[in-house]
Amino acid sequence: MSWSSPTSSYACQLDHPVGNLYVSVNCIQLVGRMSERTREKFELPKYTILTLDEAIRLIICVVFDVAEYAFPILLTPIIGDILDIAGIGLGIALFGWLGLISIVEFLPLVDYFPVFILTWIVWYYMKRQEEKERVERLKKKWK
């Protein structure tokens, strides 16, 4: 899906549609003569665009959380704990030390909360903050 705005100096290509989710945006600035009206700043839409890596991690977390609700036997103490151990290992593999948040799955009645999705949300927020700080450092470096 591609589009360009008559009031901006950019053309964009949205790649890899996954349902209603577009996982990457590539924008290229158009070169040529443009009137002052067409030199307005391009702004991305207000919704969040996930990368393929972020989307896959979110889908895995949703599957782990939904599996407990879909199969009630997974909420039993022994069998559910096996899934929790697998989820903790996967969480550490996907999110590093943040995956340890999913250890709370061992507490009673916490299985009813989407712990793996909450872990993904914390990871995503921290990742975005690190990216913003990195961009700010680069801006200061090149000023």
Image (tube, rainbow, N blue to C red):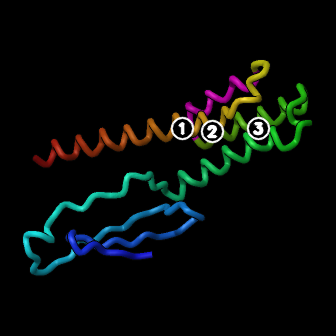
Residue highlighted by disc 2: 117
Q: Earlier in the sequence, mark 1 or mark 3?
A: 3
Mark 3, other Cα within 10 Å: few <14 / some 14–19 / many ≥20: few
Amino acid found under the numbered disc labelled 3: Ala
Residue 5: in magenta span: no
Residue 50 versus residue 62 in the image, above or below = below
For the point 74% across and 24% down, which residue is it?
110
Residue highlighted by disc 3: 86
Residue 143 versus residue 83 in the image, above or below = below
Q: What stretch of residues is rendered in magenta?
A: 95-106
What is the distance, in whole Å, between disc 2 and disc 3 at their CAs?
15 Å
For the point 73% across and 40% down, which residue is it?
65
Residue 31: which quarter of the image?
bottom left
Residue 105: in magenta span: yes
What is the distance, in whole Å, between disc 1 and disc 3 at their CAs?
19 Å
For the point 51% across and 37% down, which residue is it?
123
Mark 2, other Cα within 10 Å: few <14 / some 14–19 / many ≥20: many
Q: Nearer the viewer, residue 62 or 6?
A: 6
Residue 16 versus residue 72 in the image, above or below = below
Element at label 1:
helix
Amino acid found under the numbered disc labelled 2: Ile
In the drawing, what numbered circle is on residue 137?
A: none
Give how far across and how far down residue 134 sits, in percent.
30, 42
